[in-house]
Amino acid sequence: MLRRNAVLAVALAVVAFFWIWFYEYLGARAYWVALVAFAVCMAYGPDLSKALPWMSIGAVIGPVLGIITYILFMTVFPLYVGLSVAAAGAIFIFLAALISMYRMREMLPMTLVGWGSFLGAMARFDYLLAERSVEALPRAGFTLVGVILSLLMGILIALAMSALRLLATAREAGEATAEGQRE
């Protein structure tokens, strides 16, 4: 068990190393998004394969709600007012909860992670609307695609780690059964 976890830790470190190193070239705007998505998936537990389709849908819906939130509080509400961000955030968090109402345990965490990750990645580019508004929307579009890519990569890493863990558990169970039959 300890050896298997050590191998998984090394594999995760290697994948994270390459993701962090190449994230700019892959279109992702925030390398940490994949790590957060991985952590959420692993915290879900052993039934990850059943929740995976819903988590993936949440990983796409979240950043889409994030870009709508960003557009709303940067163009419609008064600019750079904390109340504008809070109002837009509350509206879309409520919307995320309503969208994921029937599969809340599976969808809502990844939807909120996607929403927050998109807004966190876009926080680096707040100056664009005031100084270079022509670049703001394309940057938001590229960031949207990058965040969705990062979330799905985190889910994929978690799925691979979960599959490796299930294979090792099945092998140990098979060995225990074989030993029980020999006795």
Image (cartoon, grey):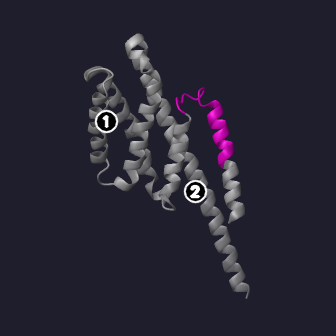
Circle 1 or circle 2, nearest the eye: 1
Residue type for callout 1: Gly
Q: How many marks?
A: 2
Looking at the rendering, in which quadrant would you find the N terminus?
bottom right
For mark 1, give the secondary structure: helix
From this view, report whether residue 50 is shown above or below residue 148. Answer: below
What is the distance, in whole Å, between disc 1 and disc 2 at their CAs?
33 Å
Give the numbered dot on residue 162: 2
Q: Quadrant of residue 57?
A: top left
- Residue 151: x, y in percent? 49, 40
The residue where tag 1 is placed is: 89
Q: Quadrant of residue 92?
A: top left
Location of residue 114 in the rendering, given as x and y in whole percent from the top left corner = 43, 39
Task: Let me know if residue 113 appears in the view.
Answer: yes
Q: Is residue 19 magenta?
A: yes
- 124 over 164 or under it: above or below: above
Amino acid carrying label 2: it is Ser
Task: Write the start and end of the magenta stretch as one range.
Answer: 12-30
Q: Secondary structure at mark 2?
A: helix
Crowdedness of circle 1 by 10 Å Cα count: few (<14), some, many (20+)? many
Is 50 located above or below residue 18 in the figure? below
Is 135 part of what is drawn in magenta? no
Please tell me which of labels 1 and 2 falls first in the chain.
1
Q: Decide if residue 135 is on the left or right side of residue 154.
A: left
* Quarter holding residue 178: bottom right
Q: Furthest-front residue in view?
A: 82
Residue 155 in view: no
